[in-house]
Amino acid sequence: MSTIVIYKTKYGSTKTYADWIAEELVCESVDAKSVKIEDLEKYDTIVYGGGLYAEMEKLLVELCDVNGDFTDKAAIKELIEYVKH
Ligand SMILES: Cc1cc2nc3c(=O)[nH]c(=O)nc-3n(C[C@H](O)[C@H](O)[C@H](O)COP(=O)(O)O)c2cc1C
Protein backbone atom coordinates (compact mmCIF):
# COMPACT_ATOMS: atom_id res chain seq x y z
CA MET A 1 0.00 0.00 0.00
CA SER A 2 1.50 3.37 -1.00
CA THR A 3 1.18 6.39 1.26
CA ILE A 4 2.17 10.06 1.02
CA VAL A 5 2.12 12.80 3.65
CA ILE A 6 1.34 16.30 2.35
CA TYR A 7 1.72 19.41 4.46
CA LYS A 8 1.05 23.11 4.22
CA THR A 9 3.06 25.25 6.60
CA LYS A 10 3.50 28.91 7.44
CA TYR A 11 6.03 28.72 10.27
CA GLY A 12 7.38 25.18 9.88
CA SER A 13 5.57 23.31 12.69
CA THR A 14 3.40 21.29 10.34
CA LYS A 15 6.44 20.25 8.30
CA THR A 16 8.06 18.90 11.47
CA TYR A 17 4.95 16.86 12.33
CA ALA A 18 4.56 15.69 8.72
CA ASP A 19 8.19 14.52 8.66
CA TRP A 20 7.67 12.57 11.91
CA ILE A 21 4.55 10.88 10.53
CA ALA A 22 6.27 10.09 7.23
CA GLU A 23 9.23 8.60 9.08
CA GLU A 24 6.91 6.30 11.03
CA LEU A 25 5.00 5.32 7.90
CA VAL A 26 8.20 4.96 5.88
CA CYS A 27 6.95 7.20 3.09
CA GLU A 28 7.55 10.62 1.54
CA SER A 29 6.61 13.95 3.12
CA VAL A 30 5.94 16.68 0.53
CA ASP A 31 5.08 20.38 0.65
CA ALA A 32 1.58 20.93 -0.80
CA LYS A 33 3.03 23.67 -3.02
CA SER A 34 4.96 21.11 -5.03
CA VAL A 35 2.17 18.53 -5.36
CA LYS A 36 0.13 18.18 -8.55
CA ILE A 37 -3.26 16.54 -8.18
CA GLU A 38 -2.48 14.02 -10.95
CA ASP A 39 0.57 12.83 -8.99
CA LEU A 40 -1.72 11.63 -6.19
CA GLU A 41 -3.61 9.01 -8.16
CA LYS A 42 -0.98 6.36 -7.46
CA TYR A 43 -1.37 6.58 -3.67
CA ASP A 44 -3.80 4.46 -1.65
CA THR A 45 -3.51 6.67 1.43
CA ILE A 46 -3.00 10.45 1.51
CA VAL A 47 -2.29 12.14 4.86
CA TYR A 48 -2.78 15.91 4.77
CA GLY A 49 -1.90 18.42 7.48
CA GLY A 50 -1.82 22.19 7.91
CA GLY A 51 -2.03 24.91 10.55
CA LEU A 52 -5.38 26.45 11.45
CA TYR A 53 -5.73 30.21 11.13
CA ALA A 54 -9.29 30.77 9.87
CA GLU A 55 -11.06 30.30 13.20
CA MET A 56 -9.04 33.06 14.84
CA GLU A 57 -9.76 35.35 11.92
CA LYS A 58 -13.49 34.60 12.16
CA LEU A 59 -13.47 35.19 15.91
CA LEU A 60 -11.76 38.56 15.54
CA VAL A 61 -14.13 39.70 12.82
CA GLU A 62 -17.13 38.65 14.94
CA LEU A 63 -15.68 40.31 18.03
CA CYS A 64 -15.21 43.60 16.22
CA ASP A 65 -18.58 43.42 14.44
CA VAL A 66 -20.64 42.53 17.49
CA ASN A 67 -18.80 44.27 20.28
CA GLY A 68 -17.32 47.32 18.62
CA ASP A 69 -13.80 48.42 17.96
CA PHE A 70 -11.12 46.55 19.93
CA THR A 71 -8.17 47.83 17.95
CA ASP A 72 -6.97 49.95 20.88
CA LYS A 73 -6.36 46.77 22.92
CA ALA A 74 -2.69 45.90 22.51
CA ALA A 75 -3.01 42.09 22.49
CA ILE A 76 -5.87 42.02 19.99
CA LYS A 77 -4.34 44.74 17.83
CA GLU A 78 -1.34 42.54 17.08
CA LEU A 79 -3.59 39.64 16.10
CA ILE A 80 -5.75 41.84 13.89
CA GLU A 81 -2.64 43.13 12.14
CA TYR A 82 -1.51 39.53 11.72
CA VAL A 83 -4.72 38.20 10.15
CA LYS A 84 -4.92 41.15 7.77
CA HIS A 85 -1.73 39.93 6.06
C1 LIG B 1 -2.44 34.19 14.50
C2 LIG B 1 -2.64 32.72 14.74
C3 LIG B 1 -3.92 32.20 14.73
C4 LIG B 1 -4.16 30.85 15.01
N1 LIG B 1 -5.43 30.39 15.03
C5 LIG B 1 -5.68 29.10 15.33
C6 LIG B 1 -7.01 28.61 15.40
O1 LIG B 1 -7.96 29.33 15.16
N2 LIG B 1 -7.20 27.32 15.73
C7 LIG B 1 -6.14 26.48 16.02
O2 LIG B 1 -6.36 25.31 16.34
N3 LIG B 1 -4.87 26.91 15.93
C8 LIG B 1 -4.61 28.19 15.62
N4 LIG B 1 -3.31 28.66 15.56
C9 LIG B 1 -2.19 27.73 15.82
C10 LIG B 1 -1.54 27.24 14.52
O3 LIG B 1 -2.49 26.57 13.73
C11 LIG B 1 -0.40 26.30 14.92
O4 LIG B 1 0.59 27.04 15.60
C12 LIG B 1 0.17 25.56 13.76
O5 LIG B 1 0.95 24.49 14.24
C13 LIG B 1 1.03 26.45 12.90
O6 LIG B 1 1.44 25.67 11.79
P1 LIG B 1 2.67 26.07 10.87
O7 LIG B 1 3.85 26.36 11.77
O8 LIG B 1 2.90 24.87 10.03
O9 LIG B 1 2.27 27.27 10.06
C14 LIG B 1 -3.06 29.99 15.28
C15 LIG B 1 -1.75 30.50 15.25
C16 LIG B 1 -1.53 31.85 14.98
C17 LIG B 1 -0.11 32.39 14.96
Image (cartoon, helix red, strand yellow):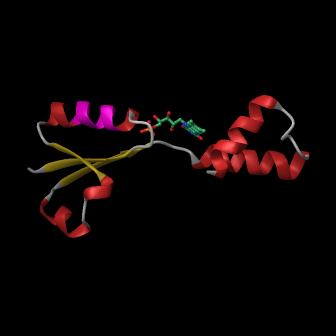
Magenta region includes residue 57: no
Residues shaded magenta: 15-21
- Residue at 15% across, 36% down: 25
Residue 78 as seen in the image, left or right of residue 37: right
State the count of labels: 0
**Point 32% across, 37% down: residue:** 15
In percent of width and height, residue 9 lies at 40, 43
Q: Can you say whether 53 is above or below 33 in the image?
A: above
Residue at figure coordinates x 32%, y 56% from the top left: 33
**Where in the figure is residue 55, as x and y percent of width and height?**
62, 46
Q: Nearer the viewer, residue 34 or 28?
A: 34
Q: Is residue 15 above or below residue 1?
A: above
The residue sitting at the right extreme is 68
Which residue is most to the bottom?
Answer: 38
> Majority secondary structure of the magenta segment?
helix
Whether the magenta-drawn stretch holds residue 16 is answered as yes
Image coordinates of residue 61 in percent, x first then y, are 75, 51
